[in-house]
Amino acid sequence: MTTSRRQHTLEVLVENEPGVLARVAGLFSRRAFNIETLNVGPTEDSSISKMVIGVAVEGHSLEQVIAQLDKLVSVISIKDVTGKVKEVHDTQPDYQN
Amino acid sequence: MAHIPTANGTAMTGATSLVKSLEAADVEVMFGLPGGAILPAYDPIFDSSIRHILVRHEQGAGHAATGYAQVTGRAGVCIATSGPGATNLVTPLMDAAMDSVPLIAITGQVPSAAIGTDAFQEADIRGITMPFTKHNYLVTDPDQIPGVIAEAFHIATTGRPGPVLVDVAKDALQKMTTFNWPTSIKLAGYNPKTTPDAQAITDAAALIAQSSKPVFYVGGGVIKANAHKELRQLVELLGAPVVTTLMARGAFPDSHPLHMGMPGMHGTVAAVTALQKADLLITLGARFDDRVTGKLSTFAPNAKILHADIDPAEIGKNRHADVAVVADVKETISALIPALKAALAKNQPDLSAWLRQMNSLKSTYPLGFDQPEDGSLSPQHVIQRIGQISGTDTIFTAGVGQHQMWASQFISYEHPRTWLNSGGAGTMGYGVPAAMGAKVGAPDATVWAIDGDGCFQMTNQELVTCALNNIPIKVAIINNESLGMVRQWQTLFYEGRYSNTNLESKRVPNFPMLAESMGCVGLSCERPEDLDKTIEKAMSINDQPVVVDFRVHRDAMVWPMVAAGTSNDEIMIARATAPDWDSQEL
């Protein structure tokens, strides 16, 4: 992986409702933002899902990606967790549970 | 949210619950056309206090609701059935999204058990409209109807306004439910910020007080926020020049000496140059659209940017902001006035040289046009006279193209909400249905649609709706028998090869006869000497829609012009004619 593309990881809490994945994926597509990775899973609150999105920011600022995502009514919160997800995995591997 | 409807707690069908919800949201009028999936809702509509105006095409319903919203500041409502009924609303929804119009679209959907089976008249309208609705819903449970309708109005009318679509499955309309209008709305993912940060206001005032060449770059948000009075106070406090974008015409009086006109591709030399030479753009509810900036990398090269907008995603989208204020622009301006007074008390910049330069440009390069040498009608003159004869309380709508630019340039706008057009989307055919909605929203005002012969042929069927529903609008067809703006580009950029822009509309259709057939008065005008009396005749008819076929010279062009993709510095005042910059002290 070259370093010319800036990688970011966003942790996005969304309403757990039909079509929410299409809303997020459609936003990235129509604004020409790049999704590198995408994981969707449940949270403790069954009405809320968590998306972890790997974004390659190229030609856009991360602020613009976050601001556009935040305009989706179904998006509750966005956290930039770049670097942090990896650390968590390093210190607390899943198999310890 | 102001009142609890008396129907609360009553058992009824989902359809009745939908209509009760619209009544609870204080809807006074909606534009629509029934069909199978939405039909259950049309039964309670028959008994409702809400006026339903039966259109001839759903696109007309959508633009009419937009015209109503633009004139009244309230949400406009349109309603259609599933499938093609719903897809006919797609263009108005996209149009409303681009111009930040509070529009509610209600659509019927096939029964929930049939969704996904390619049922008759099934279309995934929620999926289709995701890119250009502020939010949208598919309702399959009748118990959800009041809550969703309340949320839809809340989302459409607060923050940056925009369209919301509510798609309701037929069985949700047919089933029984208990009506419960919500007392409050909680949306975890939607909390628009309306009050400006104190620090941002202080920084903004300091930035303004430091500048010696500031310009107010005013966008449509100022009209949406009803901030025109506050804007005028702020402008007069600083005494700096003002430009109003295509969406902001009327936000600041055209007659005001500090008004330099409209910026952008067909803006005035003074407005375009003011932005290019400024050291500060005081950007209020505007979004650095490409039609304003021209080639972005060369736009306002020496200017710092103060950007006030309610939508955080507009900040830095196209141009970096040195100071950003995210809030309702009326609150922003109201906070800025005392802050600027305090800042100016410490440091009052001398703007006299800057104003002298701008006023020199304004007087040297006023908007103008040549009368055709063959003695035929000048389209600009027709539009200018309509504006002068009908007066500044008149509401004007336009289609898209040359006539739209001329209507923006040659009519003097003194009040907000008197100029309605399709700015962001550029929707040909917006003019007639938007005028219909405007007239419903402001029945006492004179409403003129300035339309082109191309645009008129896209949506004129709504004149039938106008004729049958006592909506006496006036339509000026600026008939140059061409897709005029496209033809202008062919003249300038395609060696005059007029591929498919000749509409032959001076031969077919016969516009006055077409108008008469739809229950309107049809008039025609071809000679300059008949112009005023034709307009006065149209002004005298107030019990029927009037359509005037103004048969104008074909080769008139819109000037000034900044060609697409070029720098604003390359503005032309006529073909191959740049302003004489050497004679200007800039």
Image (tube, coloured by chain):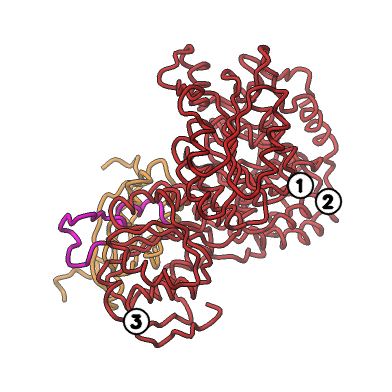
Of residues B246 and B511, which is closer to you in this image?
B511
Kindly identify the amino acid type of the residue bearing the numbered disc 3.
Met
Q: Residues within 10 Å of mark 2 (few under 14, many from 20)?
A: few
Residue beneath the point at 75% across and 27% down: B366
Q: Are marks 2 and 1 in contact (CB under 8 Å)?
A: yes
Q: Residue at x 50, y 65 (%)?
A: B51
Question: Residue at horizontal 63%, vertical 27%?
Answer: B525
The image quarter containing residue B443 is bottom right
Answer with mark 2 or mark 1, whichever residue precedes in sequence: 1
Q: CA distance from mark 1 to mark 3?
A: 64 Å
Q: Secondary structure at mark 1?
A: helix
Considering only order in the chain, which callout, 3 or 2, is on the residue closer to the N terminus?
3
C-alpha distance separating marks 2 and 3: 66 Å
**Chain bearing mark 1:** B
Drawing shade for chain B:
red
Residue underneath mark 3: B12
Residue closer to the observer: B61 or B425: B61
| Chain-order first, disc 1 or disc 3 | 3
Crowd around label 1: few <14 · some 14–19 · many ≥20 (10 Å):
some
Question: Front-most of A23 and A38?
Answer: A23
User: Mark on residue B210?
Assistant: 1
User: Does dot 3 land on a helix, a strand or a loop?
Assistant: strand
Q: Is residue B295 above or below residue A48?
A: above
Chain letter for the part of the structure drawn in orange:
A
Tell whether B532 sits left or right of B181.
right
According to the image, label 2 marks what residue?
B347
Task: Assess whether residue B117 is covered by the magenta stretch.
Answer: yes
- The region drawn magenta spans B110-134
